[in-house]
Image: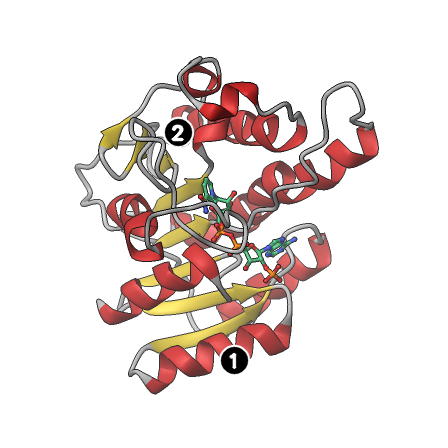
Amino acid sequence: MTSVLITGANKGLGYETARRLGELGWRVFLGSRDEDRGSAAAQKLAADGAHVIMVPLDVTSEESVAGAVRLVRQHTDRMDVLINNAGTPGGGVNPADATAKDIHAVYDTNVYGPVRVTNAFLPLLQAADNPRVVMVTGAGGSIAFVTDPGQAVSKMYELAYTSSKAALNMITVRYAQALPAIKFNAVTPGEVANGRFPATDMNRAGVLTVTEGSDPIIDRATLASDGPTGTFIDRLGSIAW
Ligand SMILES: NC(=O)c1ccc[n+]([C@@H]2O[C@H](COP(=O)([O-])OP(=O)(O)OC[C@H]3O[C@@H](n4cnc5c(N)ncnc54)[C@H](OP(=O)(O)O)[C@@H]3O)[C@@H](O)[C@H]2O)c1
């Protein structure tokens, strides 16, 4: 049975990804920093027949990540797919007003979080036949997208979130180069060319469904062993870094 761990899977795109991979018959380790919200989400998926195990997991805590590894090891000694989905938007603070504290809080979740979780799960990933790591970054991490004057984001002045996702893009590439036996791919929910993104609690202006938003996550999570590593895609295909 294929096993997947999804961080921040109690709602939004993470939950939809859990639902879709559960439907494929995968064993879903549903990460949630809040146990009650995670249990409620896991119960909903289990009621529809999915094989789901809720994993308490706050990506900002080394202790929580270590606990997640221990819990997963009670069920399996390999992890086929890790989806680093948990993310925070931060407060949208203008660069002139941003403090190192604001930036650190966003990076702790969006940058250090995926590194903590990935490194803690490397032994389990390395034990799988075709291990894949999906980094849910964002169009905001694409310098090409943010500097396109036709995109509204070029006039939304913000520092922490977009730079955190740009860092996560580079981190994805560096992992892909250093660990060729594992596929590391970055995805952004949505359609960058059309400026269309999924509606979630994080993006109330979104126009796509969470199913459409999760398409690129599912695509990279289900890659065959001859699939690519070190790519950046949205639901329409490759996008510029
Ligand atoms: N929606 C979009 O248009 C869009 C566009 C580009 C990129 N993204 C990315 O897609 C990913 C999913 O976002 P979403 O749109 O589905 O937003 P969402 O509905 O707000 O979900 C975010 C998830 O991340 C979790 N989370 C936040 N901090 C965490 C932490 N420290 N540890 C563990 N989990 C944590 C949240 O848990 P709680 O419920 O406990 O808060 C929630 O489950 C994010 O990485 C986001 O940056 C989204």
The percent coordinates of residue 9 (x first, y second) are 48, 62
Residue at the image position 60 percent from the left and 31 percent from the top: 164
23, above or below 231, in the image? below
**Residue 153 versus residue 12: which sits nearer the camera?**
153
Residue 49 placement: quadrant: bottom left
Q: Nearer the viewer, residue 195 or 214?
A: 195
Mark 2 = which residue? 176
Closer to viewer: mark 1 or mark 2: 1
How far is the residue under mark 1 from the one under mark 2?
Answer: 35 Å
Q: Answer yes or no: disc 1 within 8 Å of ligand 1.
A: no
Would residue 79 be found to the left or right of residue 41 on screen? left
How many marks the image carries: the answer is 2
Residue 179 locus on image (x, y percent)? 41, 32
- Looking at the picture, how far across and down is residue 123, in whole percent? 48, 50
Which residue type does callout 1 highlight? Ala
Q: Quadrant of the N terminus?
A: bottom left
The answer to whether residue 147 is above or below residue 226 is above
Crowd class of label 1 (few under 14; some 14 to 19; many from 20; radius 10 Å):
few
Q: The C terminus is located in which quarter? A: top left
Q: Amino acid at mark 2?
A: Ala
Query: Which residue is the site of mark 1?
Result: 40
**Label 1 SS:** helix
